[in-house]
Image (cartoon, rainbow, N blue to C red):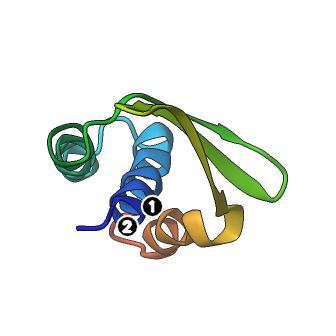
Amino acid sequence: MKRSDALYNWLQIRVVLDERPDDLSAQDTESFFKQILVEDHKLNMLTYVREELHYVLTYVTEEGPKETKFDRDAVELLLTAIQAEPKYAE
């Protein structure tokens, strides 16, 4: 999996998990993508900040600190879809 795809997938599920900390499926999925980032892409110190139009991810690679931005609306699509589904909205 490309690093950019893994970062995006991790961020989407991390946003869900932050909103739904007891969601076991979100916990497992977040761990899966984080493992890919750590083991395959050698990233650590992964954090994000939500801005008005973007999410800004910061992380450290073997080459040093990096930053990647993702569109806020795109990142929040998964959370919106989960919240719109009555059986998951609790």
Residue at the spot x=42%, y=43% of the render?
A: 20
Q: Residue flagged by tag 1: what amino acid is it?
A: Tyr
Instruction: Say whether residue 67 is left or right of residue 83.
Output: right
Q: Residue flagged by tag 2: what amino acid is it?
A: Asp
Most extreme residue toward the top is 45
**Residue 60 percent location from the top left of the image:** 44, 29
* Residue 8, numbered label: 1
Asked which quadrant contains residue 56, the reply is top right
Q: Nearer the viewer, residue 83 or 75?
A: 75
Residue at the spot x=41%, y=54% of the render?
A: 7
* Residue 5, numbered label: 2
Most extreme residue toward the front is 63
> In the rendered image, which quarter contains the C terminus?
bottom left
**Could you tell me if the residues under marks 1 and 2 are in contact, i.e. CB atoms within 8 Å?**
yes
Asked which quadrant contains residue 70, the reply is bottom right
Residue at the spot x=34%, y=31% of the render?
A: 62
Q: Is residue 90 visible?
A: no
